[in-house]
Image: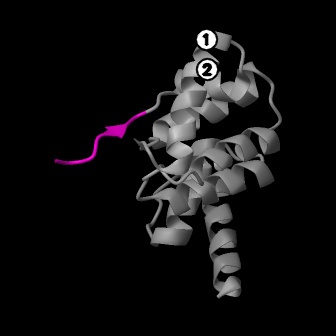
Amino acid sequence: MKKRVSLPDTNFILRYLLRDNEAHFVEASEYFEKVRVGKESALISESVLVECLYVLTKHYKVPRAEATKSLHGIFIYKGVINPNREVLTRALSLFAETTLDPVDCLLIAMTAIEGHAVKSFDRALLKRIVFQAGQTNNEK
């Protein structure tokens, strides 16, 4: 039988990170502890990640670096099974280091790691992709 995978949504992750509702925090904390040690499997979608970043930084006014550090911490849990984990963690790093929006950070990370080509009319985004590609090539 295939192991069941959970899909935590934005609110579930936010209650865990913000601890602003004690009952929800307890439930989310118990779940994420199981994910941390690999007793539960979780897949965190790109859309949930983007929404978490948006809500944390815009609604709760959490600094970008702090928001990304908290979310990055979850992605290193043993039970997080995202096949694109490297892309997501790279996007989180870019979000912390720049003023780019989360979707642009994901696109840049995908080009850097997976070699995809972005089609856009956003010249600043395309410049950043070229810059990032140059940095990635210098790291090799």
Residue 24 in the image, given as x and y percentages of width and height? 59, 15
Which residue is at a point 72% across and 19% down the rendered structure image? Answer: 59
User: With 116 as the anchor, is 49 left or right in this view?
Assistant: right
> Is residue 122 visible to the viewer in this orientation of the structure?
no
- Amino acid residing under circle 2: Val
Please give the label number shown on residue 23: 1
**Between 41 and 127, which is closer to the camera in this rendering?**
41
Provide the residue span drawn in magenta. 1-7
User: With 6 as the anchor, is 140 left or right in this view?
Assistant: right
Residue 8 in the image, given as x and y percentages of width and height? 46, 31
Please give the label number shown on residue 26: 2
- Amino acid residing under circle 1: Ala
Pointer 2 local density, CA inside 10 Å: few below 14, some 14–19, many at least 20: some
Up-down: is 140 above or below 33?
below
Q: Are marks 2 and 1 in contact (CB under 8 Å)?
A: yes
Up-down: is 138 above or below 48?
below
| Mark 2, secondary structure of its residue | helix
Residue 14 in the image, given as x and y percentages of width and height? 63, 25
**Between 6 and 40, which is closer to the camera in this rendering?**
40
Which residue is at a point 56% across and 70% down the rendered structure image? Answer: 112
Quadrant where the image shows the C terminus: bottom right
User: With 120 as the anchor, is 57 left or right in this view?
Assistant: right
Residue 7 in the image, given as x and y percentages of width and height? 40, 34
**Colour mapping used in the image:** one colour
